[in-house]
Amino acid sequence: MRLGVDSAVVVARMSGWSARVTVDSPSSHLDLAAAADRILVAAFLAGSQEAFNVIVTRHQRNVYQLCFRFVHTHEDASDLAQDVFVRAFKGLKNFKGDSALSTWLYRVGVNCCLNQVAAKRPSTESIDDAQYVDERLDDPLRAVVRGERVAEVRRAIAQLPPKQRATLLLRVYQELSHDEIATILGCSVGAAKANFFHALRNLKRLLQP
Amino acid sequence: MTLHLSSQEYVDAVDGTLSSVRQAHVARCAQCRAEVESLVGSVMTLTQDDVPEPSPLFWDHFPQRVQTTTQAEGFSASDTLWWARWKTVATAAIAVAGVVVAATIYTRPATTAIEPMDSVLGALETAASVTVEAQWEFVTNVLGSLETEGVRSSLSPSAQAVDAAFEDLSVEERENFMRLLRAEMDEGMQ
Ligand SMILES: [Zn+2]
């Protein structure tokens, strides 16, 4: 990857080489909103809160959606997503840049989510059928049936072993590659594929009447 | 008779990336075909579930909400500065060591033709590999991805910048810096 002039400026500033100017300076010509993730990380590590806010803005939707898949309510998902970013804030200095920032955030997210659901007893996990009713559907009965089916599928997913559950959610809903999932879960690509296979198989078994 | 698909091959079949040889097996084998169809059916079941979209207001306020929480917990972005500052001096130490190594190699009769700048970069990489802090890897990655000209310019700190950085250090940080610098220079001279 070749970094542009702006990137060099950030690196220079981050390292204090040529000038001790922060990236939050009004005179800074660096457009954080358009900067690459790697540059934002460097700017954040140089003390820029604004750079971290851009990171949150850029990745909040994916992190929130992942969290929602684990907890199924907006309130819990937003609390969990907030927790993910707070952990990221504290842990970003350990980000080595050997994977994409999004992958690293997913890793933090999966850990937060698995901890959260492990702390909750399965019976207390909120599965509110009513919220699955899709109001866009014309036929209310169809909507209810669909809502019930979705609730049933969510309950089945919640019963999968943690790694299978995470793999399934990352693959089907976040549409990540097996390589990315392997990086997030710290396993081989083969193991990630095997997890996905067993997750689908177990899901089928759990959904059988 | 060929073997049935492995679990990984089933996933490849669902993804549509199964090799043509194995696809031919699936076409012939009712058992594998049924399993692939069942897996595809499971994926289809899953994709009917959408995440409800929160209000645009939620997205607008969320970064501020995170910032408020980190601040309430006593963290701020400037907390990372001590680390960045230490890294500054550490990187300066590596750069100085690199120049020393390069000068040594340049003045010595070389057995192979080595460009001085390459020597500096090589020395930087070597020096980076012996650093204690794993985070330095990130800095060298960033520096390593710059073009030579970029590295050359970024490795040209003004004396004032290094002085200023040094002035900001605590006594302990200065001692660590001097120890590191001596170690790097000793190594460069060997
Ligand atoms: Zn077969």
Image (tube, helix red, strand yellow):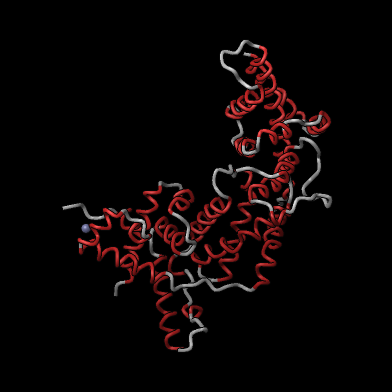
Quadrant housing residue A202 = bottom left
Tell me if I can see residue B95 in this picture: yes
In percent of width and height, residue B8 lies at 33, 53
The image shows residue B76 at horizontal and vertical percentages of 72, 50
Q: Is residue B87 visible?
A: no
Q: Nearer the viewer, residue A106 or A124?
A: A106
A19 or B78, which is in the foreground?
A19
Counting from the top left corner in percent of width and height, residue B175 is at: 73, 25
Residue at image coords 48%, 57%:
A176
Q: Is residue B3 above or below residue B49?
A: above
Q: Where is B52 relative to B100, above or below?
A: below
Judge from the rendering whether residue B111 lies leftward or rightward of residue B2; answer left or right. Answer: right
Q: Residue at x 63, y 25 (%)?
A: B118
Relative height, residue B173 to residue A69 (above, below):
above
Instruction: Pinpoint residue A33: horizontal percent, then vertical percent.
Output: 70, 57
Instruction: Name the residue: 65% across, 14% down.
Output: B189
Q: Quadrant of ligand 1?
A: bottom left
Quarter of the picture containing the C terminus of chain A is bottom left
The quadrant the N terminus of chain A occupies is top right
Farthest front residue? B113
Front-lying residue, A156 or A167: A167
- Give the residue furthest to the left: B1
